[in-house]
Image (spheres, rainbow, N blue to C red):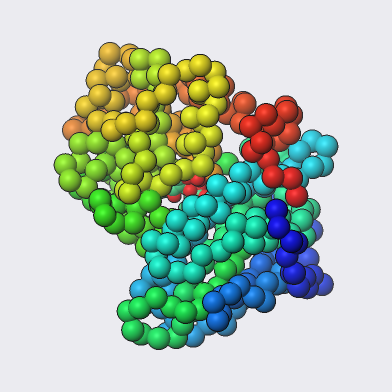
Amino acid sequence: MTDTLDIKITKTTKSRLAETDFSNLVFGRTFSDHMLVADYEGGEWKNIEILPYGEIALSPAISALHYGQAFFEGLKAYKHEDGTIAVFRPEKNAARFNKSAERLCTAEIPVDLFTQSIAALVDVDRDWIPAAAGHSLYIRPVMFATDAYLGVTPSKTYKFVVLTCPVGPYFTKPLRVKFETHYTRAAEGGFGYAKAAGNYGGSMLPFKKAAEEGFDQLIWTDAKEHLYVEEMGAANVMFVLDGKLVTPSTRDTILDGVTRDTVISLAKSWGMPVEERRVSIAEVVEGARNGKLTDAFGAGTAATIAPIGAFHHNGEEFTLSDPSTREFSQKVLKTLDDIRYGRVEDTFGWNYVV
Ligand code: PLP
Ligand code: COI
């Protein structure tokens, strides 16, 4: 870590904590008392400030709105039983934030500025971190272009904003999913690997249609042939096939997920064979038919480990085993919780203590 950041902190005089119902949290609707804002101007980051959560004034001409020079991250802070607060693997998110920055041609951000800003904000709002099982403080850093200029060219000014939300589980039941073989999330040479705002805007119509057909989520497939599995909604997708952990290898159409990497690291530490490669719809269907598909789940920060209960393909429905009986994902969930809630030693060095 380099020098400590110079952050101006203005605390709210009207905390909303006492009036917040922590037993009824809807993901992303409840914001904690403070936010962090920093400006990029003249080739440097400045004015780093923690202030009460609220509106910020922006020109309607900013290029983020017109041309989508905007991207974000998602990570979580957990409260341990002894009161320690730790953010889970923020350096990974910082690295990915800068990958998005490079692809969207924005300013980059020093890793220390990213991690220390987040730690400072989480520290100020530490009372907002729920301690209940499956709960945490979701952290949403976002960067967007602020030049008021309609030329299609990279902005010279940016804002970095961090918001936090107390959250419970994103999915509360096993998911019924379909393979999306019409719409495409990302194509080769595109920016699917970036956490670009536009990737999510483009996913809304396919999601809406899938929901109208009775699906909870969809599994994106490759843009060229729609034969290979890519991701599941806003999460990576992982399978246990014939005793091996099998997941699509990362490439420019796939977001390189922190949770995905975490699950792979755990599996390897348990001596389980891991295959990162192209995964065809056909082999997943075949695995469901012959019983070799013993686990299937989405892996993401918001989603955590989200079991696939059933999937649909070409008019056929395949129901998978009851998630509570699945050896691998249950072990992953328990181990992950033990690490994130500080119940066991963090041998991987994943907890960034605030
Ligand atoms: N893929 C997409 C498209 C996502 O939005 C997310 C969520 O962040 C993931 C994968 C999972 O990434 P991570 O585990 O880093 O949250
Ligand atoms: C996350 O898991 O952090 C995500 O970005 C998913 C989100 C779009 C709800």
Residue at the outermost left position: 225
> Residue 80's image quarter?
top right
Residue 331 vs 16, above or below: the answer is above
Q: Is residue 19 left or right of residue 315?
A: right
Which residue sits at x=29%, y=36%? 229
Give the percent coordinates (x, y) of residue 173.
49, 34
Give the percent coordinates (x, y) of residue 42.
55, 81
Q: Is residue 239 left or right of residue 107?
A: left
Which residue sits at x=29%, y=19%? 287
Give the percent coordinates (x, y) of residue 131.
74, 41
Which residue sits at x=38%, y=61%? 103
Q: Is residue 242 left or right of residue 57?
A: left
Residue 182 vs 307, above or below: the answer is below
- Camera-side residue of 28 and 92: 92
Give the percent coordinates (x, y) of residue 82.
83, 37
Residue 110 visible from this viewpoint: yes
Which residue sits at x=73%, y=34%? 342
Residue 154 vs 246, above or below: the answer is below
> Residue 123's image quarter?
bottom right
User: What is the total number of numbered labels drawn onto the structure image?
Assistant: 0
Residue at the outermost front position: 2
- Camera-side residue of 245 and 31: 245
